Image (cartoon, rainbow, N blue to C red):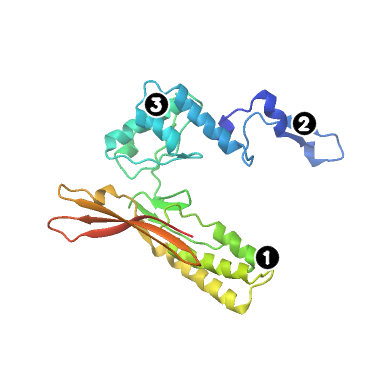
């Protein structure tokens, strides 16, 4: 995505780099400048997002409002996450947003959907073969925003593989920071590790000092517990759980705080005239 966004000529000097042919640094280097925004530059995500929104603004005529809104509000860098009540609307969206963004030089690929019907479409936009690639892989799990989504079963899955890090305060902070759970679905178990990090900070343990036996035992117990989290799945869809002519939906929000942490959670309670009510969590935040 970044490489599709050009750098103005007046700014290319800020992205200048030197190149020694053959790696021989005894020779005079060649000087180059980036003409597109590179991966790793702090400015690249902002510039790419600006270009994406500008494309939607310039070419919005002739496209449904929800398509333009999706470009502005549903992209996370180069991932677009959307959901629709019907397959017809989803297929219309795929065609429209592909055509719209192609006009700005952004070619959307690698679509993933939980609908077999939507997976069959392949609109010919941008005159490029296989522009729309619907995943038909036997592997039905895809990762987005740090969450594994099994689109065949339409459930979220969680996997934790602790990277090799020293058993120090710095190493623990690195592992905790690598956890990304935007919906807060595993926040309660993550809080345990954050509390341990709090204790390490209060103990004034150096960043690279080894943990003592007590802290090491607590940390390893948490890591072993997190390795079992792969057995947890959470249904992604909400609408199908609240459908029905006699469905009554109530939202309940709870929050609390203490010296070691805080938490907020939102639950939905769905009741029917002839069935027992069901309750499920749809978002949470703990820290």
Element type at mark 1: loop
Residue occupied by mark 1: 207
Look at 25% across and 53% down and name the residue there.
Answer: 250
- Given residues 230 and 84, the one toward you in this image is 84
Residue 68 in view in this figure: yes
Element type at mark 3: loop
For the residues labelled 1 and 2, the Cα–Cα distance comes to: 40 Å
Query: Are the residues flagged by discs 1 and 2 in contact, CB closer than 8 Å?
Result: no
In the rendered image, the residue lying farthest to the right is 26
Look at 39% across and 64% down and name the residue there.
Answer: 231
Q: Is residue 140 above or below residue 67?
A: below
- Given residues 102 and 180, the one toward you in this image is 180
Please tell me the numbered disc located at residue 278: none
For the residues labelled 2 and 3, the Cα–Cα distance comes to: 41 Å
Look at 56% across and 76% down and name the residue there.
Answer: 217
Q: Position of residue 201 (x, y in %)?
A: 62, 67
Query: Are the residues flagged by discs 1 and 3 in contact, CB closer than 8 Å?
Result: no
Q: Could you tell which of marks 2 and 3 lies nearer the N-terminus?
A: 2
Image quadrant containing the N terminus: top right
Left or right: 30, with 94 as reference point? right
Please tell me the numbered disc located at residue 31: 2
Please tell me the numbered disc located at residue 124: 3
> For residue 219, what is the image quadrant?
bottom right
Q: Is residue 280 above or below residue 132?
A: below
Q: Could you tell which of marks 1 and 3 lies nearer the N-terminus?
A: 3
Q: Residues within 10 Å of mark 2 (few under 14, many from 20)?
A: few
In the rendered image, the residue lying farthest to the left is 274
Q: Is residue 212 above or below residue 283?
A: below
């Amino acid at each position: 995505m970044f490489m599709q966004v050009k750098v103005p000529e007046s700014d290319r000097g800020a992205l200048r780099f030197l190149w020694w042919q053959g790696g021989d640094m005894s020779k005079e280097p060649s000087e180059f400048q980036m003409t597109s925004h590179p991966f790793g530059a702090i400015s690249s995500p902002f510039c790419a997002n600006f270009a994406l929104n500008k494309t939607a603004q310039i070419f919005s005529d002739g496209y449904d409002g929800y398509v333009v809104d999706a470009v502005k509000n549903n992209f996370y860098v180069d991932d677009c996450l959307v959901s629709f009540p019907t397959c017809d609307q989803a297929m219309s969206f795929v065609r429209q947003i592909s055509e719209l963004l192609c006009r700005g030089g952004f070619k959307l690929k690698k679509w993933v959907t939980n609908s077999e019907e939507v997976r069959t479409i392949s609109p010919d936009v941008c005159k490029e073969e296989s522009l729309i690639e619907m995943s038909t892989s036997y592997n039905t799990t895809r990762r987005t925003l740090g969450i594994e989504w099994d689109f065949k079963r339409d459930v979220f899955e969680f996997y934790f593989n602790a990277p090799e890090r020293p058993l120090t305060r710095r190493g623990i902070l690195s592992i905790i920071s690598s956890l990304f759970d935007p919906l807060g679905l595993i926040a309660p178990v993550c809080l345990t590790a954050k509390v341990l990090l709090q204790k390490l900070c209060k103990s004034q343990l150096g960043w690279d000092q080894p943990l003592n036996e007590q802290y090491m035992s607590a940390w390893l117990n948490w890591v072993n517990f997190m390795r079992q989290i792969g057995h947890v799945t959470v249904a992604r869809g909400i609408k199908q759980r609240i459908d029905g002519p006699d469905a009554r939906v109530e939202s309940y929000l709870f929050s609390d705080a203490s010296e070691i942490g805080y938490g907020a959670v939102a639950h939905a309670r769905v009741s029917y005239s002839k069935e027992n009510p069901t309750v499920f969590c749809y978002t949470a935040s703990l820290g």
